[in-house]
Image (cartoon, helix red, strand yellow):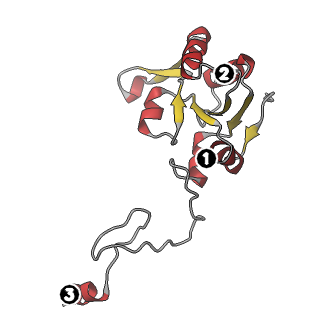
Amino acid sequence: WTHPWPRLKPDDAHARVFDDGWTWVDIRTAKEFNRETLAKAVSVPSAVFTGTTMLDWATEAVPLAEFRDALSASIPNHAEARVVAIPPTDDNEASLAALAAMHDLGFAEFAQVTSFDDYCFNYTPVGKKRPPVGSHVHVPGAPGTVCVGSDLPVVHKESARTIKN
């Protein structure tokens, strides 16, 4: 199925949101949004989780009329809004219907990022570019602490001598 709207690679979507002032609209489930989302994102779920245990979990589409109402409430002036939709990683039927409804709603400009996982592979949720896979990032910090973004504890020479003795 071909999309009548642009599917943006992570770098292009990032530039539109952080450089050009577009708005993220996250159409993943509320549970996925609450677990992890992108800075400045608006949540308008296209599906809900049903079931009580992992064995009977399923997603159920939000009725399109309800989705459109929630979208209009979240972005009231949609004729002037420029949005990038964040779909779930799997293009399920609910998300494809929601994307089509968003396209038909008449935003000034509309596109989607390929998927949430694609974006997060390249950028952190707050929009910082991730280092290439396999590269080591040196993050200085206080002696004996583990720094965010580093897999290794920071050890100064004095601390290393103490540990060896």
Asked if residue 2 lies left or right of residue 93, the reply is right
Q: Which of marks 2 and 1 is nearer the N terminus?
A: 2
Above/below status of 10 relative to 72? below
SS state under label 1: helix
Q: Residue drawn at (44%, 63%), measured in percent from left and top?
A: 149
Depth check, front residue: 97 or 54: 97
Q: What's the residue type where badge 1 is placed?
A: Tyr
Q: Residue 25, how many percent across, how many down?
A: 59, 31
Q: Nearer the viewer, mark 2 or mark 3?
A: 2
Q: Earlier in the sequence, mark 2 or mark 3?
A: 2
Asked if residue 49 lies left or right of residue 93, the reply is left
Residue 119 image label: 1
Quadrant, the N terminus: top right
For the residues labelled 2 and 3, the Cα–Cα distance comes to 62 Å
Contact check, label 2 and label 1, Cβ < 8 Å: no
Q: What's the residue type where badge 2 is placed?
A: His
Q: Residue drawn at (52%, 42%), measured in percent from left and top?
A: 38
Q: What's the residue type where badge 3 is placed?
A: Thr
Q: Residue 155, how many percent across, how many down?
A: 32, 80
Q: Residue 23, how many percent across, how many down?
A: 61, 35
Depth check, front residue: 53 or 8: 8
Residue 105 image-quadrant placement: top right
SS state under label 2: loop
Residue 78 image label: 2
Residue placed under numbered mark 3 in the picture: 162
SS state under label 3: helix
Q: What crowding class fits label 2: few (fewer than 14 Cα within 10 Å), some (14-19), or many (20 or more)?
A: some
